[in-house]
Image: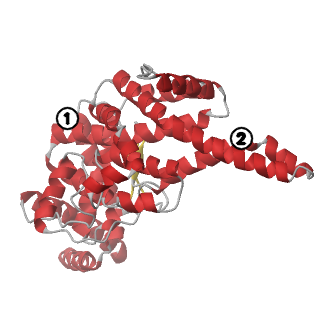
Amino acid sequence: MPKRDIAARLRQMTAEQCATLDPQEIFTSPEFAEHLQGLVNETMKIGGKATSKISVNVVTTPNSPPGWTDGNDIYVNTINSVSSHYTLPLEQFITLRGICFHECSHVLYLDFNEEKKALKSIGDGKLYGELPVPQAAEDDLMMHEMEDALADPLYRPIFQQVFSDVTNTIDDPHDEGKIIRRFGGIVEQGIVLARESLLRSFDYAENIVAGKGSDLEKIYSLMLEYARFETIMMRDQDACLKTQPLVQCVVSLAKPIATARWTDDMKVRFAQINEIMLKLWPLEKQKQQKKQEKQNQQGDDDSKNPQGNQSGGNSTQEAVQNILGQLQKVSQNQNVSAHPNRRTSSTEAVKNRQAARAGKQPASGEKTRPVNQDSAMKSAQAALDAVAKKVAERIAAAAME
């Protein structure tokens, strides 16, 4: 076949492939990974880390987070609840780029080594950073009790879990805010769209409080939501704040959470996190005591059974594992909660996008339609089309061999 005919046939097959490409086929392609790699390289260059060789890896693991990084490599998971929240390929494309930029923000602004030191310190039995100053005798008592518990290796996994969850949640809005202020443009576009999807995964506080689970689980869930968005989604804010003690407890954490979210000083951040852990300790202690009392009672009832005596002897360890399991459950469920079924007006949609840029919660629970035919959206569409064309060309070329 003449070269001219081959070229014409290749163009025809490429066009046919473009018309039938599945979005996931695009997003899992080496061409899309190359596109993300180019964005990361440019971001690192402008961000002052031109010598950093950050490798972008596109993966498809349904049960993993949307993205993650260790400071050296970035992973973007194309099968996730954040991008799949949207139905249009363009929205999904922008959101996946936003997930990638989100991880870039951690590479640029997160002090991985300092957080590792803090986690190791807790594992060794000591809080990292400045300790809270007790404001009352009860606070002083709780501080000593928490330090005594931390000195026991049995309790340390609880403190490590809380520290990890709080720091990971607080790091997100802090680092996103910095990269958005530094770059704007497609970086802001992608992160805002990803954030809008995420913030709709949270249920109303009234539903959480009335639902199943312990008070510790409910407060922990609401606290992590507040740490991420600096607000809690409520149907009736005034009534909820006045009548719901669990919500009031989270509100009492507002000051240390807000300070930790926006400070660039890691020492200040760790001091605020220590205060948050002190506020949570009475709940953890209460949950541990109730679980232990229940298990001890069961041991007394089964005292004639050797296995029953063994159960009573392990009651503290089982109670600690129960608390740890509840905290881990809340942490894992943050991205899969069903969003409330409410309509979002166009006016609310504008407010939601403004709130998302500030790291805050939307005016209502249903997803908005942030896609507008402005220059930024046209630019994103052109980028998606370019990636899709490269994928189609590769498939068409292989078919002609």
Q: Is residue 83 visible?
A: yes
Q: Tell me residue 278's x, y (percent).
A: 48, 31
Tell me which corner region of the image, top left, top right, bottom left or bottom right, holds residue 25.
Answer: bottom left
Q: What residue lies at 27% left-to-right and 33% top-to-bottom? A: 262
Among the two numbered marks 2 and 1 on one chain, the one whose residue lies closer to the N terminus? 1
Q: Which residue type carries mark 2?
A: Gln
Q: Is residue 389 visible?
A: no
Tell me which corner region of the image, top left, top right, bottom left or bottom right, holds residue 17.
Answer: bottom left
Residue nearest the observer in this picture, 87 or 401: 87
Residue at the spot of label 2? 317
Quadrant location of the C terminus in the rendered image: bottom left
Q: Tell me residue 110's x, y (percent).
A: 35, 33
Tell me which corner region of the image, top left, top right, bottom left or bottom right, holds residue 365.
Answer: bottom left
Residue nearest the observer in this picture, 206 or 56: 206
- What element does badge 1 sit on? helix
Q: Is residue 373 left or right of residue 317?
A: left
Residue nearest the observer in this picture, 15 or 256: 256
Residue nearest the observer in this picture, 361 or 1: 361
Query: Which mark, residue 312?
Result: none
Q: What residue lies at 29% left-to-right and 31% top-to-bottom? A: 259
Q: Is residue 1 left or right of residue 107?
A: left
* Image vertical order of residue 8 relative to residue 167, above or below: below
Residue at the spot of label 1? 46
Q: Is residue 264 left or right of residue 122?
A: left
Q: CA distance from mark 2 to mark 1?
A: 50 Å
Quadrant location of the N terminus in the rendered image: bottom left
Q: Residues within 10 Å of mark 1 (few under 14, many from 20)?
A: few
Q: Which residue type carries mark 1?
A: Ile
Q: Residues within 10 Å of mark 2 (few under 14, many from 20)?
A: few
Q: What residue lies at 23% left-to-right and 35% top-to-bottom? A: 45
Q: What residue lies at 15% left-to-right and 44% top-to-bottom? A: 184
